[in-house]
Image (tube, helix red, strand yellow):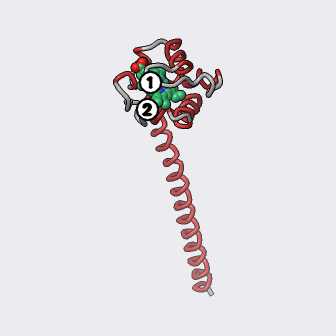
Amino acid sequence: MRKFYRRISEKKTSTIVGLLLAEVLIVFFVCACGNNLKEDNKVIDGITNETMVESNPDFVKAQELYIANKCISCHGTDLSGRVGANSNLQKVGNKLTAEQIQNQIKNGGGGMYPYKDKLTEEEVILLTNWLRSKK
Ligand code: HEC
């Protein structure tokens, strides 16, 4: 009889150990996920200023306009310009004032056609602000 009891209690113990193990594993996995989140945060923290600028929603819109309005065909995917030195926009923010950039976009000139009838005032401003950040 005693032996029988012991066996039951042994069984119970092993069940409890099993449950504990499962719990430890669950906690471990939850922690692991938590850690992954932290890792992600770290990556976000590690974003360079450059990337931050590129993820500014207004700048994202400006880049879409840049592509949709074919600026990209003359100024290139990396803004390095494909139609002469002045078509390089990589440091246009140092070279021109916001007003000058806006004028160039609206009125064109030097081989670039005017965009004042193609873009709204707001779109011109979006593009101008984005290009002004290129320094
Ligand atoms: C047909 C080709 C072409 C297209 C399309 C074009 N550009 Fe240009 N862009 C040029 C050229 C060429 C110049 C240099 C003009 C000069 O020499 O004065 C220029 C100059 C500029 C400048 C002034 C750069 C400087 O250093 O003087 C800005 C800003 C600019 N473009 C923005 C844009 C934007 C924004 C778009 C689209 C909305 C666009 N361009 C579309 C050809 C183009």
Q: Does residue 32 appear left or right of residue 78 in this picture?
A: right
Residue beneath disc 2: 74
Question: Which x, y percent locates residue 110?
Answer: 43, 20
Amino acid under label 1? Gly
Question: Which x, y percent locates residue 112?
Answer: 47, 25
SS at circle 2: helix
Question: Residue 12 falls in which quadrant of the image?
Answer: bottom right
State the residue at coordinates (50%, 13%).
Answer: 100
Question: Which x, y percent locates residue 54?
Answer: 49, 32
State the residue at coordinates (46%, 44%).
Answer: 39
Is the residue at mark 1 in contact range of ligand 1, meaning its CB lies under 8 Å from it?
A: yes
Of the pair 20 and 54, the residue shown nearer to us: 54
Residue beneath disc 1: 111
Amino acid under label 2? Cys
Is the residue at mark 2 in contact range of ligand 1, meaning its CB lies under 8 Å from it?
A: yes
Q: CA distance from mark 2 to mark 1?
A: 10 Å
State the residue at coordinates (53%, 65%).
Answer: 21
Q: Does residue 91 appear left or right of residue 6 in this picture?
A: left
Question: Compared to 84, does 96 lie above or below?
Answer: above
Question: Compared to 108, does 28 lie above or below?
Answer: below
